[in-house]
Image (cartoon, rainbow, N blue to C red):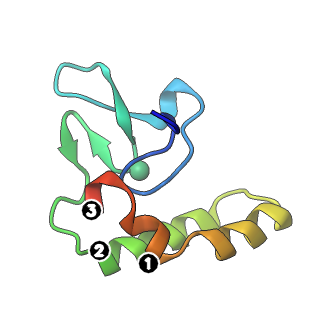
Amino acid sequence: MAKPNMCQSCGMPMKVSSDFGTEKDGTPSEKYCHYCYENGKWIQPDVTFDEFYAFSLKRFQESDMNRVEKFFLNKMYTKKFLKKLERWR
Ligand SMILES: [Zn+2]
C-alpha cells in the first residue's frame, strides 16, 4: 500500500495509535481512524457522502492546524479527494 496511514473513510493522516479506530476484538484498524470507526463499526453508519464530506471538512477546519495546514486543507480536501477513499468508491 502506498499510503497505509491515511484513514480510508475521511482521509485523516493517522500517526499515533490513538488516531486509529478499533476492530471488534479491540485490535487497531489498519484502514480507519477513531473518528470514523470503533469496535468494528462505523461511527456514522447511515451518513451520506455529502453529509460526511461537510462534517469532516468542518472537523478538520476546527482542529488545531496552523494557517499553512489550513490553506492546504481547503485546497486538497475536496469531494473528488474523498471519493477516492475506499469507503466511498
Ligand atoms: Zn476517518
Q: Could you say which disc has been placed on residue 89 in the image?
A: 3
Q: Identify the residue at horizontal 67%, vertical 75% (top origin).
A: 75
Q: Position of residue 77 (x, y in %)?
A: 57, 70
Q: Position of residue 19 (x, y in %)?
A: 50, 36
Q: Identify the residue at horizontal 67%, vertical 67% (top origin).
A: 73
Q: Is residue 86 left or right of residue 59?
A: left
* Quadrant in which residue 26 is drawn: top left
Q: Is residue 71 left or right of residue 27?
A: right
Give the residue type that dot 2 points to: Phe
Give the residue type that dot 1 points to: Ala
* Tags 1 and 2 touching, CB below 8 Å: no
Q: Identify the residue at horizontal 72%, vertical 56% (top origin).
A: 64
Q: Could you say which disc has been placed on residue 54 in the image?
A: 1
Task: Say which of 78 and 15 sits in front.
Answer: 78
Q: How far separated are the C-alphas under marks 1 and 2?
A: 9 Å
User: Depth-wise, is mark 2 or mark 3 nearer the camera?
Assistant: 3
Q: Earlier in the sequence, mark 1 or mark 3?
A: 1
Q: Position of residue 56 (x, y in %)?
A: 46, 66
Q: Label 1's element?
A: helix
Q: Which residue is mark 2?
A: 49
